[in-house]
Amino acid sequence: MTSTYSTDIVIFGGGVAGLWLLNRLRSNGFHAILLEADTLGGGQTIASQGIIHGGLKYALSGSFSAAAQAIAGMPARWRACLQGEGDIDLRGCRLRSENYYMWSQAGFRSRLKTFLGSKSLRGRVEAVDKSAYPEFFKRATAAGTLYQLPDFVIDTESLLAELIRKQENHIYRIDARSLAFYKNNAGDIDHLTVSNGDHSLRIESQQFVFCAGEGNEGLVSRAGLLKPRSQIRPLHMVYVKRPELPALYVHCIGGSFSLTPRLTITSHAAADGSMVWYLGGELAEAGINRSAADQVAAATALLRELFPWLHLGDAQWGCFTINRAEAKLDSKFRPDDALFIEEANVLVAWPTKLSLAPSLADKLIEHLAAKSITAIAEDNTVELDKVLAQPKIATALWN
Ligand SMILES: Cc1cc2nc3c(=O)[nH]c(=O)nc-3n(C[C@H](O)[C@H](O)[C@H](O)COP(=O)(O)OP(=O)(O)OC[C@H]3O[C@@H](n4cnc5c(N)ncnc54)[C@H](O)[C@@H]3O)c2cc1C
């Protein structure tokens, strides 16, 4: 048996990009649904460190390009949402830390000072007065300097819950293997079909948006598109759990002051109440070919080197690999802003960073307005509800 459903916009992928866009489109009056192949947020979003970047990236690029300005504006955009005054009401999203720091070991101090001076960063990256150091750095037995950045850290599980809260009736789980796209003579997608085994569903829509992270590539090929190309960057992330760990939110930079710090630490609460340090940065990029045991050994050695006063005792360690998915640019550079590529009536989109999800939604909505796409469909989901269930929400990878 086949049922038919029509809508204005179908979004694929329920990570931060798709969910943010769904909220924005629906509050702008569009009839939109989101189709998720697995768990909501279960790709990069739940694996992210939750840092709302702004300052450091802007600072390190040292430029006033549009991309640099877009990311520099993100902390304020997110803060407005967290206070219920932005595009989306995120008052229920928990902040893990108001502050984010950068720790530079003593040996790099004079070079760092010159570097910060040369990029006119005053006011964006502030050296913290020793009297205001967080407790952990007050106990430092190795010399170094602590800087405060305008970034902050959100809790991604509560972010997902907030983004889903008002949209539950417009989000559906699909079996991606059953998905087929059908084109019209103009080369646009006319409709798609999905099935749950017994019952199949035909979904017609004006516009389709792929926000499926790593899954975009499969969707692009299934839809027979040629233009949108993506790339993945694998990371080998590590976590360490111990009830006594202090909360720590810091980039540890080395002598090269590159965009990828040697170690990026965020702190999270595990379901059993333990503190979790989640470790990324260069450790995760460089460790991609290491075995789990070697990656944990590398992380232990790095923490010992950076924080000789830290006692990890009987901490529990874990690690996993996860791919970052981004648009593939023609140049050798990685994208530094949210991006979408259009082919026929499909927009294939990547936020590039969690922080840039608001910017991606702005760009997509501006594009739809420029194409004069307006709401025309009815919003009757009875047929959808008969065939498709709701997806579950992802939980943190250390629980
Ligand atoms: C380890 C790590 C740490 C990071 N830390 C930060 C950070 O601190 N700050 C920051 O700003 N950014 C960070 N990022 C980047 C950020 O997480 C991503 O840019 C962002 O989460 C991407 O969101 P997304 O919605 O595009 O993709 P995802 O979160 O990957 O979501 C894609 C969704 O699509 C679904 N899907 C896949 N295939 C299909 C299909 N065929 N049909 C339907 N659905 C499908 C998946 O199941 C998934 O739910 C980090 C990334 C990683 C990997």
Image (tube, rainbow, N blue to C red):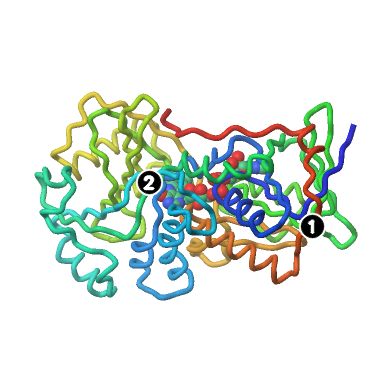
- Which of these two is toward me, 113 or 363? 363
Q: Nearer the viewer, mark 2 or mark 1?
A: 2
Secondary-structure class at tag 1: strand
Q: CA distance from mark 2 to mark 1?
A: 37 Å
What residue do we see at 49% from left, 49% from top? 90
Give coordinates of residue 15: x percent, y percent: 56, 45
Q: Are marks 2 and 1 in contact (CB under 8 Å)?
A: no
What residue do we see at 46% from left, 61% from top? 77
The quarter of the rendered structure image containing the C terminus is top left
Q: Which residue is mark 1?
A: 206
Amino acid type of the residue that numbered disc 1 sits on in the rendered structure:
Gln
Give coordinates of residue 127: x percent, y percent: 19, 62
Above or below 94: residue 75: below
What residue do we see at 62% from left, 47% from top? 212
Secondary-structure class at tag 2: strand
Q: Residue furthest front?
A: 84
In this rendering, position of residue 82 left or right of residue 394: left
What residue do we see at 26% from left, 69% from top? 123
Location of residue 110 (image quadrant): bottom left
In the rendered structure, which disc, 2 or 1, sits on the residue that comes first in sequence? Answer: 2
Q: Which residue is mark 2?
A: 95
- Which of these two is toward me, 133 or 189? 133
Amino acid type of the residue that numbered disc 2 sits on in the rendered structure:
Leu
Say whether mark 2 is within 8 Å of ligand 1: no
In this rendering, position of residue 390 left or right of residue 197: left
- Which of these two is toward me, 48 or 243? 243
Query: Local crowd at mark 2 within 10 Å, few (<14), some, or many (≥20)?
Result: some
- Which of these two is toward me, 258 or 164? 164
